[in-house]
Image (spheres, rainbow, N blue to C red):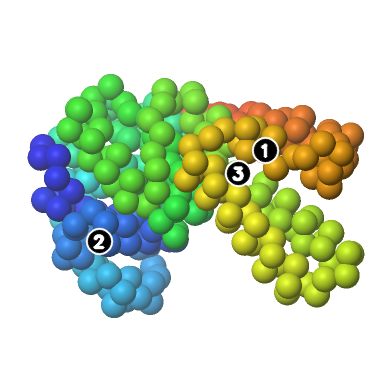
Amino acid sequence: MTSSLSHMKFTFIGAGSMAEAIIRGLITKGGVHGENIFVINRSNRARLEELRERYGIRSSVNELEKDDAIRTGHIVVLAFKPKDALEGLSKIKHLIRPEQLLVSVIAGLTIDTMQTLLGAADYSIVRTMPNTSSTIGLGVTGMSFSPNVTPAGRQLAVQMFESAGIVSTVEEPLLDTITGVSGSGPAYIYYMMEAMIQGGVQGGLEPEEARRLVVQTVLGAASMVQATGENPADLRRKVTSPNGTTQAALETLDRHGFPEAVAKAVLRAAERAGELGAAISASVTSQTK
């Protein structure tokens, strides 16, 4: 298998927002032509037409053509919903070949469960956990590999998702932790932004002006960490003058347990990811007996 994305044929099973984010990255940053991407969707023809017009991808409602696209794709991206996993994988398993690279963006579905559904353990499976910021090219994707994935296959998978942000390759159990940090992470930041806007409004600012200031503040703070390479703790200390306004604010956050609450939120999200994955696995096991 060549390690160049531009030489690959991609088949996407599912046409949701995450599939589109990957497609956009492949075309705009990965050097992949739209004609090398085939997208399959269960019933929404309008969505397929939208993707064709936007990216020049290929699609079809003909079952034979769809089966051929799955059979002949170098990389098959499994992008359907977790509730459709049993039906979806069972339906295509006779079309999948061991030499293909299977890339899953199905939340909670473990590599072992996918191998069970496919009926064999010799498939090359890449399990990923992207977050919603991938839709604007600033995503974080956690990634794990089944033993059969070759070094070239790993490189291809990393390149795919680097076109939509950054990638962290980890052992599969740590994907739950990445879910807690980055998968759910944007919501923590949005929640804090909501509270900052509310504080600005309570202090007399117009809502739209408070929103504008908060968005730029968060964007600037993240950019400072990235641009300087410094630890957030060091940057925090630099802007915290003794007995100043920032110190007063941080002491208030500390009194209300802010650091502990955020850390506990990350760990609880990771724990919940494991619970959901176990439930999906148990459901699949019971249905395949």
Judged left or right of residue 240, residue 2 is left
Nearer-N-terminus badge (1/3): 3
Judged left or right of residue 97, residue 127 is right
Residue at 78% x, 72% y is 207
In three-dimensional space, the C-alpha distance between marks 2 and 1, rounded to whole angstroms, equals 41 Å
Q: Label for residue 238?
A: 1
Residue 232 image offset from top left, x and y in percent: 61, 36
Residue 89, above or below 26: above
- Per the image, the residue denoted by label 2 is 27
Nearer-N-terminus badge (2/1): 2
Secondary element under disc 2, as helix, strand or loop, is: helix
Residue at 34% x, 55% y is 22
Front residue of 144 and 12? 144
Q: Label for residue 185?
A: 3
**Crowding at mark 2 (Cα within 10 Å: few <14, some 14-19, many 20+):** many
Can residue 82 be seen from the camera position used here?
Answer: no
Q: Residue furthest front?
A: 242
In three-dimensional space, the C-alpha distance between marks 1 and 3, rounded to whole angstroms, equals 25 Å
Front residue of 176 and 28? 28
**Crowding at mark 1 (Cα within 10 Å: few <14, some 14-19, many 20+):** few
Which kind of residue does numbered mark 2 sit on? Ile
Residue 155 image offset from top left, x and y in percent: 23, 36
Query: Which label sits in the foreground, 1 or 3?
Result: 1
Secondary element under disc 1, as helix, strand or loop, is: helix
